[in-house]
Image (cartoon, helix red, strand yellow):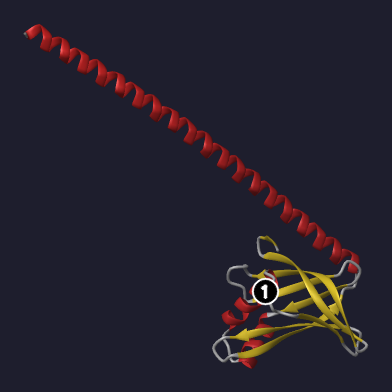
Amino acid sequence: MAGLDNGTCIRLEVLEELDMSTVKRTLFVKSVWEPTRLSPTSFSLAISDGHRAWTFEGSETFVKKRAEVWDKNVSWVMDKLKLLLTVVQPGIAYHLTGMLDNHRKFSFEIQDMETNLSLTANFSLVDASDPEIVTRDLLGFLLHGNEILTVDYVKKCRSFDQVLAENKALSEQNKRFAHEKKQFEQAVYKKALTLQFLCL
């Protein structure tokens, strides 16, 4: 999963159902969460398999209607959608189904732990007018996200190396202090013995 500002991208293994047959496909799903990724009230999807591409607009009205149908509040719906569209969840099957108008329906099940029911999230996708642009945007998003992760990783490695260097310097300083303390104690002890000898 790649993330950047209010957008995320995930690689999914999807079951595509066409003409009474099911084929496993790999899809890249980019989600944009508005107004922010932390507290979204709407979202949009851009989906591509490298050749074909689709889009979906999850407006505030769409989210509110979904919340009403599921008898949930909007924040619950958005939290579930965000979880299942940003991180691959074990045991969750994602489906891409052909529709009569040659569009696609993207769907998956959401488990409601309170009622122990499965709620189906359905998204009627629209064929992208220019699949190449959508796919190129997805790849650019992934590459940019990878660059940011690489920079963060390098910074963390440098920070870790710096911490190791500081710990090494501190350890050497402690050894030096311990050695100097020992020398000081020996000098004081020697001086005390000398004074004691002179007083005899």
The reply, left or right, for residue 7 in relation to residue 124 is left
Residue at the image position 52 percent from the left and 34 percent from the top: 165
The reply, left or right, for residue 13 in relation to residue 196 is right
> Label 1: which residue?
89
Q: Position of residue 27 (x, y in %)?
A: 82, 71
Residue at the image position 44 percent from the left and 28 percent from the top: 172
Residue at the image position 70 percent from the left and 63 percent from the top: 1
Using a 10 Å C-alpha cutoff, classify the residue at mark 1 as few (fewer than 14 neighbours), some (14 to 19) or many (20 or more).
few
Q: Between residues 148 and 161, which one lies in front from this camera angle? A: 161
Vertical placement of residue 115 versus 197, above or below: below
Instruction: Label 1: state its secondary structure.
Output: loop
Vertical placement of residue 99 versus 7, above or below: below
Q: Where is residue 79 in the image (x, y as percent from the top left)?
A: 60, 76
Q: Where is residue 4 in the image (x, y as percent from the top left)?
A: 68, 59
The reply, left or right, for residue 169 in relation to residue 3 is left
Q: Residue furthest left?
A: 200
Residue 195 sits in quarter = top left
Q: Between residues 174 and 62, which one lies in front from this camera angle? A: 174
Q: Position of residue 47 (x, y in %)?
A: 81, 71
Q: Which residue lies furthest to the top in this view?
A: 198
